[in-house]
Image (spheres, grey):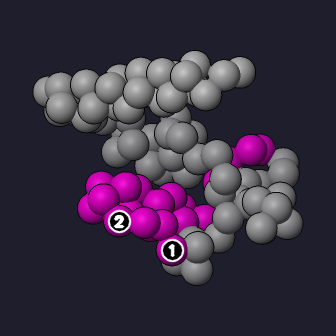
Amino acid sequence: MTEYRRQSAKEVRESASQIARDRKHMTHQSNGDEQRYAGAHFAMSFTKGLEHESNNGLIRNADDFRAFRSAIDNGKHLQPDSFTICKALIRMR
């Protein structure tokens, strides 16, 4: 790949990134599933990376999911010590 092509591709990516950043984004509206299925250890929610029970696939600790969501809702970086993550992810570090 030539230097010109590399530079051109970089400029296209940066331009696309700026367009995506500047556009108006819709506000996310909850469908209520997290509240509706909280008693089922958030069975209908995204829980990838959290520890799950081997016998039923549900998350092991509902508080881990709450900490995960709290960090997302508050725009904070996730602190790994604030919830238990999957052992496979720990091994990847």
Residue at 32 percent across and 26 percent down: it is 15
Circle 1 Cα neighbour tier, 10 Å, few/some/many (<14 / 14–19 / ≥20): few
User: Does residue 66 appear in this view?
Assistant: no
What amino acid type is highlighted by mark number 1? Gln
Q: Tell me if residue 60 is in the magenta stretch.
A: yes
Q: In the displayed structure, would residue 78 be above or below residue 52? A: below
Residue at 25 percent across and 25 percent down: it is 19
Q: Which residue is mark 1?
A: 79
Q: Which residue is mark 2?
A: 76
Q: How many numbered tags mark residues here?
A: 2
Q: Is residue 32 left or right of residue 55?
A: left
Percent x, y of residue 69: 40, 56
Circle 2 Cα neighbour tier, 10 Å, few/some/many (<14 / 14–19 / ≥20): few
Q: Which residues are magenta?
A: 56-79
The picture quadrant where one finds residue 56 is top right
User: Does residue 12 appear in this view?
Assistant: yes
Location of the N terminus by quadrant is: top right
**Identity of the residue furthest to the left in this view:** 24
Q: Is residue 75 left or right of residue 51?
A: left
Secondary structure under badge 1? loop
Q: Is residue 72 left or right of residue 18?
A: right
Q: Tell me if residue 39 is in the magenta stretch.
A: no
Q: Nearer the viewer, residue 37 or 82?
A: 82
The picture quadrant where one finds residue 73 is bottom left
The picture quadrant where one finds residue 81 is bottom right
Mark carried by residue 30: none
Location of the C terminus by quadrant is: bottom right
Percent x, y of residue 80: 58, 73
Question: Mark 1 and mark 2 in contact (Cβ < 8 Å)?
Answer: yes
Residue at 45 percent across and 41 percent down: it is 37
